[in-house]
Each structure stands twice: as structure tokens, then as C-alpha cells.
Image: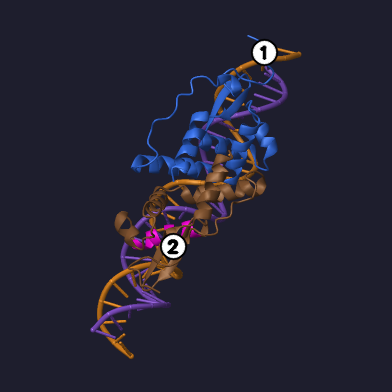
Chain colours: A brown, B blue, C purple, D orange
Amino acid sequence: MPTTARIAPSCGPTARAGEALDLRPVEGREADDELALLAKAVGHPARVQILRLLVRREACVCGDIVDELPLAQSTVSQHLKVLKEAGLVRGEIDGPRVCYCVEPRGLRRLKALVGGL
Amino acid sequence: MPTTARIAPSCGPTARAGEALDLRPVEGREADDELALLAKAVGHPARVQILRLLVRREACVCGDIVDELPLAQSTVSQHLKVLKEAGLVRGEIDGPRVCYCVEPRGLRRLKALVGGL
DNA sequence: CATGGCTATCGTCTTATTACGATAAGCTGC
DNA sequence: GCAGCTTATCGTAATAAGACGATAGCCATG
């Protein structure tokens, strides 16, 4: 197990296996609620920036996010929690820090639901 | 000018002319704010339902929306206002009622921004 | 011109969101 | 084991969102 500098094993392009396509419907009451939930999570500038940051650096960054945003550490943590609970982001404990990366399934689901409008 | 039952002249498939494609960028601070704004507007189940309703009936419905949702008329009006201010929906006064329809540009913009993630 | 049906707005209440500092929790390296 | 760094959570305060009833505005019809 090589101690790769800042990249946790379960994040990044390494974990691109097993991407079964999503068969859930993009319409109906359940899909509505799901879309609302996802959209709400994206509905804040800071969270959009965080998402983009994580998408850009395909490898997942840790609390460097705090340095990129003009917000307090606790606020960023809160935003990350929102994104995590919405299933758009995943956090892996990597030693003393936490490594965040986009949850591809969640992002794909969001795109599918918006595309289904 | 035929008095078509409930279809205002500027709504519906009739008004599909002049759809220039959007050249604005899908990244950057401005795009972030725009996406956040649009996503926030979609970030409520009732508003998702309204959007779908308007998309489904390509001709625009009026306050029939109120009948479809388990919400008070004033609440629905509020949600419509949010959607309108986000540029996702357009309202045309059609005699005694108001005719709502999706704003194709806004919806396309949302899809482009989400797709750009 | 008055009546009646739609819709928007206002006022109000309740709840959620956002942001921050301070504090606690967890792992590493010494 | 302790010191130090990183991150999450708590407490708190300000603001925004969501919902409703009541009211006002508007247009067609009688």
C-alpha cells in the first residue's frame, strides 16, 4: 500500500469502477423531491464553488477548500455537510485530514434529473 | 385574431421562434452565482412540480396549478414569483387570468450550467 | 356600472439557513 | 504520551424562506 501523498484510495480517478447506469425514473413525485433536494444543495454560490473545485481537481482536495473561499472554516465545513448529505460529495478520512471528492453518482443523477425537465 | 380558448399569444409552442443559442460561459464566478440562483429556485418540491406541469402542458396553464397542488393560492403565487424572478417561467396576462409558461431560455441555461459541472 | 371570478400582495407566524467564534475530537510525529 | 495540526460540532445571532388568511386590484360578463 503506497502512501500516496494526499490522495486517499477511494477518491479520485482510481475509483471509477462499477459505474452502473442509473435506472431510476426522472419523473414522478419521488423524482421531484429528489431533484428539489439536489438543487437546493447546489443553490448556494459557495457550494457551487466547492463543487467546481472538487470537479476540477479530479483528485480530491482536503481543507484546501477553506483557503479558496472567503469563509470561516466552520462555515465551509457546514457547506460540505450539506453537499455530503445530498449525496453530491464524499468525504474520506485520510490520516489527520479529510479528503473530499465529488460523488459521481450524485452528480450524474442531478444531471439526469435536470436534463429530464 | 381567433380567441383561442386558454392559450395566450406569447406562450406555448407558437413562441418558439428566435432561439439564439446562449454564448455565455458556464464557468467562472458569474456562472457560479447564476447556477446557484437557478438551482435555488428549483430547490423546492412544489416548484419542481410547477415546472414539470408547465413543461408537460406545452401550452401554458393558468391558475389550474393551484388545483394540482395541495397548497393555498397565495403560496402557489409566491412560488410562481420565485420561478419568474429566476427567469425560469414567464407570466402573461390573458384577460381575467394569468397564463404561465416555461421560459425556454432560462431552462436551457440551467441545463447548460448543470451540464457544465 | 356593478358583480363575480382570478391573481397578486400584505401582514404575520414559524421554521430553516447562513455565518461566525469557540470548543471538542482525532490522528501524527516527536 | 503529548503537542500540534486539521476538521467537525455546538451555541448563538441575524437573515431568509415557507406557508397561510385576508385584502386589494383587474378584467370580462351581465
**Chain part drawn in magenta:** A73-84
Please tell me in which quadrant of the rendered image residue C7 appears. top right
Q: Position of residue A60 (x, y in %)?
A: 39, 60
Q: Position of residue D12 (x, y in %)?
A: 41, 64
Please tell me in which quadrant of the rendered image residue B95 appears. top right
Is A77 included in the stretch rendered in magenta?
yes
Relative to A59, residue A93 above or below: below
Determine the main secondary structure of the stretch shown in magenta.
Answer: helix
| Residue at point 53%, 48% (across, down) | A110
Please tell me in which quadrant of the rendered image residue C4 appears. top right
Q: Is residue B30 visible?
A: yes
The 10 Å Cα crowd at callout 2, few under 14, some 14 to 19, many 20 or more, is many
Q: Position of residue A26 (x, y in %)?
A: 62, 45
Q: Position of residue B19 (x, y in %)?
A: 49, 23
Of residues D18 and B45, which is closer to you in this image?
B45
Name the amino acid, label 1: Thr
The 10 Å Cα crowd at callout 1, few under 14, some 14 to 19, many 20 or more, is few
Relative to A57, residue B77 above or below: above
Q: In which quadrant is the C terminus of chain A drawn?
A: top right
Q: Where is mark 2, residue-wise?
A: A11
Disc 1 is attached to a residue of which chain?
Answer: B
Q: Where is mark 1, residue-wise?
A: B3
Would you say A49 lies left or right of A30 here? left
